[in-house]
């Protein structure tokens, strides 16, 4: 089972779901950016068009990585991702003031 | 790695300039260095205008035409050198996106005998002089050369950080407040640094990094105690689940304290009350935070 946690980002290997829309193709993709720190989780490969990003109707993102990829961040250790199809997850929390679940904002 | 004396000197000058960021502004020396820089490029230098901060610099530059002669001359010098020295110099300066560091690496690799490379090194030497005199940025426009002095920076542990004033202060007074690399507006920064922020207020901060620095300065344990939090469960993976009785919030609240595996920073984050009541285990609540089943979190080993 391939699940990677990189700070507040989770990347989980899954079977490719149906009905996805391609939103990005390239060699480098910013998975998440921090507002207060200006830092970002950046995925890159050596293969041109080695990263394809898809979205489902709910806005969930998926990565199709054809070569070995690295995910980097200014403060987190670098991780190597094997080729595969992944779901991008983002850390969430419960806001007791708004009484709702929301994505962690950093 | 062995450095030649010239390369070592350049690296030492860069380090000294970094230590003096914002402390030096010698306008005459900056202009003189830039004049020599333009002379090396064989491009006439337009009149110089000193701009207070980078925000204004960018704004001004949008309304002005770029100096295409400068661009061409500079690009030619840079590209030729990069093509010649890339392979050999890359190891020494890969992580230093700075022309002078490149020059040091090129000198070190013994490539500075090539006249084109020597020209590049001469150019970078002028920029290093300007940097030493306090130049932060410059915008080479057609009719004006905009010069922006380096702001005063307060850095601790390689992060912007100041508990007694702004961590970034530009010449014109524009300032930014940071704690441990996290930007905060002045009001919040003041509340945190004067210890006037309550535990409840800290937990209400929407941005988790701002919440983290507030808790860091308050001490997370003390803050949790101040709102009557009781430790319910802890795990070997460093996750701690706390319950806060109704009263502080309108319902019984559950918070997870956990450590980032890479940075070691401590975070406190709310857990869905229904889920936490049914799964009052720290690791299961951590699994919920990432949308994982508890057994998936158990198998999650690659964390950074």
Image (cartoon, rainbow, N blue to C red):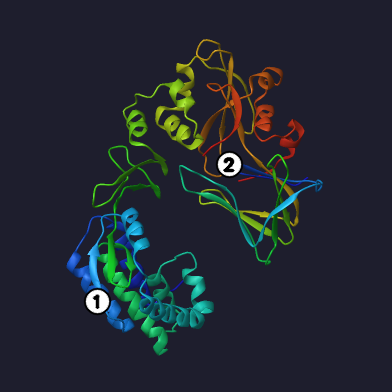
Give percent across and percent down for residue B54.
33, 56
The quadrant in which residue B234 appears is top right
Q: Are marks 1 and 2 on the same chain?
A: yes
Residue drawn at (28%, 82%) of the image: B39
Dot 2: element: loop
Dot 1: element: helix
Mark 1 touching mark 2, by CB under 8 A?
no
Give percent across and percent down for residue B261.
58, 41
Q: Is residue B78 left or right of residue B145?
A: right
Q: Is residue B280 left or right of residue B92?
A: right
Could one spot residue B239 in this view of the protein? no
In front of the other: B301 or A40: A40
- Find disc 2 in the rendering and name its residue: B261
Please say if B160 is above or below B94.
above
- Find disc 1 in the rendering and name its residue: B35
Point out the image quarter for the N terminus of chain A: top right
- Of marks 1 and 2, the one in the foreground: 1
The number of discs equals 2
Chain of the residue under label 1: B
In front of the other: B290 or A62: A62
Please say if B116 is above or below B291.
below
Residue drawn at (32%, 73%) of the image: B142
Disc 2: CA contacts within 10 A as few (<14), some (14-19) or many (>=20): some
Q: Which mark is residue B157?
A: none
Q: Is residue A104 left or right of residue B180?
A: right
Disc 1: CA contacts within 10 A as few (<14), some (14-19) or many (>=20): some
């Amino acid at each position: 089972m391939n699940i990677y946690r990189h700070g507040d980002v989770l990347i989980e290997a899954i079977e490719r779901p149906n009905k996805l829309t391609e939103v990005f193709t390239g060699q480098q993709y910013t998975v998440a950016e921090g507002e207060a720190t200006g830092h970002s989780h950046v995925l890159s490969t050596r293969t041109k068009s080695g990263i394809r990003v898809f979205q489902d109707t709910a806005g969930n993102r998926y990565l199709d990585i054809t070569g070995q990829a690295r995910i980097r961040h200014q403060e987190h250790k670098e991780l190597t991702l094997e080729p595969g199809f992944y779901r991008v997850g983002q850390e969430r929390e419960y806001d007791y003031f708004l009484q709702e679940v929301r994505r962690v904002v950093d | 790695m062995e450095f030649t004396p010239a390369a070592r000197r350049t690296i030492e000058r860069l380090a000294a300039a970094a230590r003096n960021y914002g402390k030096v502004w010698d306008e005459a020396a900056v202009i003189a260095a830039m004049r020599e820089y333009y002379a090396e490029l064989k491009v006439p230098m337009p009149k110089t205008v000193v701009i207070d901060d980078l925000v204004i610099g960018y704004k001004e530059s949008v309304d002005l035409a770029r100096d295409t002669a400068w661009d061409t001359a500079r690009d030619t010098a840079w590209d030729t050198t990069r093509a010649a020295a890339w392979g050999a110099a890359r190891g020494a300066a890969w992580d230093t996106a700075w022309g002078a560091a490149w020059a040091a690496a090129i000198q070190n690799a013994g490539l500075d005998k090539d006249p084109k490379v020597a020209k590049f090194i001469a150019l970078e030497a002028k920029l290093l002089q300007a940097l030493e005199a306090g130049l932060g940025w410059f915008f080479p426009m057609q009719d004006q050369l905009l010069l922006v002095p380096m702001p005063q920076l307060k850095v601790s542990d390689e992060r912007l950080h100041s508990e007694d004033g702004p961590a970034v202060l530009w010449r014109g007074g524009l300032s930014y407040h940071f704690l441990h690399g996290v930007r905060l507006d002045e009001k919040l920064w003041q509340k945190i640094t004067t210890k006037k922020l309550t535990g409840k207020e800290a937990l209400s901060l929407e941005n988790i990094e701002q919440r983290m620095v507030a808790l860091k300065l308050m001490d997370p344990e003390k803050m949790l105690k101040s709102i009557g939090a009781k430790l319910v469960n802890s795990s070997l993976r460093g996750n701690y689940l706390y319950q806060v009785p109704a009263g502080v919030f309108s319902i019984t609240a559950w918070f997870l304290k956990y450590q980032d595996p890479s940075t070691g920073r401590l975070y406190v984050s709310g857990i869905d009350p229904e889920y936490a009541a049914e799964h009052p285990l720290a690791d299961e609540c951590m699994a919920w935070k990432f949308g994982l089943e508890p057994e998936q979190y158990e198998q999650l080993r690659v964390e950074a």
